[in-house]
Amino acid sequence: MVDATDYKIVHELNQNARLSMKELGEKVHLTGQAASSRVLKLEEAGIISGYQVCVNEEKMGNPVHVFINIYTRGPYHRSYFSILDQYQYFVRNNYKISGDGCYLLECRFPSNEDLDEFITNLSEHVEYKLSIVLKNTLK
């Protein structure tokens, strides 16, 4: 069972996964050893499934952030997935969804020209609705 301390641990590790166990313990009011034990239990339970690097996409040269609702033309989606493979450098997430559309595709592009090339090729295989991210209001 996950308790309030576990939630605090997960929150702190989401903020900075490179914290030492001593630093983590101080933030959640545990000893370093107790924090380490809690983290291990969260990992063994599959609650913490890994650690990752957060990349500043703009500094990496990919300032154009888009979400694309995908509407497939039939039950066979192979040609759509082949486009994703072809442009995998730009694709960040592809969610199968219910409601409006079949998939919600999240991409990052270096330029509007690269985005235009992508959607031109994409339109040969699926219908789509494009949304360009103007600003993340949570950051």
Image (cartoon, rainbow, N blue to C red):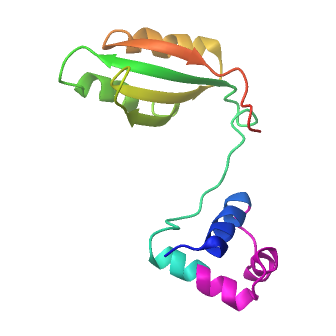
Region in magenta = 16-38
Q: Residue 46 in the image: x percent, y percent?
A: 45, 70
Residue 66 sits in quarter: top right
View extreme (left): residue = 75
Q: Is residue 80 magenta?
A: no
Q: Is residue 63 left or right of residue 122?
A: right
Question: How many numbered discs?
Answer: 0
Q: Residue 82 in the image: x percent, y percent?
A: 31, 28
Q: Is residue 96 above or below residue 68?
A: below
Q: Residue at x 60, y 58 (%)?
A: 52
Q: Residue 77 in the image: x percent, y percent?
A: 24, 25
Q: Is residue 32 left or right of residue 73?
A: right
In the image shown, does 56 or 10 lie closer to the viewer? 10
Q: Is residue 44 left or right of residue 23?
A: left
Identify the image quadrant of the C terminus.
top right
Residue 100 sits in quarter: top left
Q: Is residue 22 magenta?
A: yes
Q: Is residue 34 above or below residue 108?
A: below
Dominant SS of magenta comes to: helix
Q: Residue at x 41, y 35 (%)?
A: 95
Q: Is residue 16 left or right of residue 39?
A: right
